[in-house]
Amino acid sequence: MNSPTVPGGAGHDRRGFLRRLLTGSLWVGLLSLLGGMMAFIFPPARQAFNPGRLSLRVGSVRDFAVGQGKQVLFDGRPVWVLYLPQGFVALSAVCTHQGCIVTWDEKRHLLNCPCHAGVFDASGNVVAGLPLRPLPRWRVEIVGDEVFIGKEG
Ligand code: FES
């Protein structure tokens, strides 16, 4: 038994399909355009810090107590990451006199060099001893709850 034929059925189906295809394409295009406009008007939050090749995650903020320091290796060089009442500071741990490794005094908030009694404050400035230059600083960024250090500049 043959199914009844609808006059113009095949052409009608083809036109309907093409109409739906065209309408769907227009909607997809319109939504893409709106999405692009919304992304332009309301840009997504960007990370203030790009943890690229020359950056290092040193831990979570929760890992530090105020006054505490943590020595890490960055690019093969020792760096002190200090959590001070005013925030994080990262300083080279290499004394600028003759290259000995300074230690962090949590109680006095000073960096002491064991070789010739050089002393630096928590900003890296020379306080006493033979060093003539301050300790180089490193950039510190907090991304979410994570602490990163990177090269200045
Ligand atoms: S190497 Fe640090 S004071 Fe001399």
Image: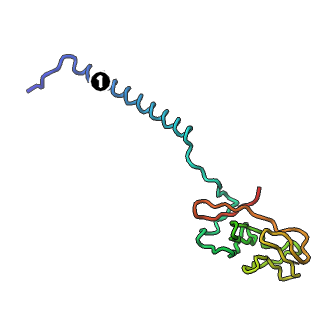
**In which image quadrant can residue 42 be found?**
top right
Colour mapping: rainbow
- Residue 17's place in the image compared with 142, above or below, is above
Task: Name the residue carrying label 1.
Answer: 16
**In which image quadrant can residue 129 be found?**
bottom right
Q: Residue furthest front?
A: 85
Could you tell me which residue is drawn at 78 percent across and 76 percent down? 110
Could you tell me which residue is drawn at 85 percent across and 68 percent down? 134
Q: Position of residue 143 (x, y in %)?
A: 61, 59
**In which image quadrant can residue 121 be found?**
bottom right
Considering depth in this image, is 102 or 11 the residue closer to the camera? Answer: 102
Q: Secondary structure at mark 1?
A: helix
- Residue 10's place in the image compared with 104, above or below, is above
The quarter of the image holding the C terminus is bottom right
Could you tell me which residue is drawn at 61 percent across and 69 percent down? 59
Considering depth in this image, is 50 or 64 the residue closer to the camera? Answer: 64
Q: Position of residue 33 (x, y in %)?
A: 49, 33
Name the quarter showing ligand 1.
bottom right
Could you tell me which residue is drawn at 12 percent across and 22 percent down? 4
For ligand 1, tell me if the residue under mark 1 lies within 8 Å.
no
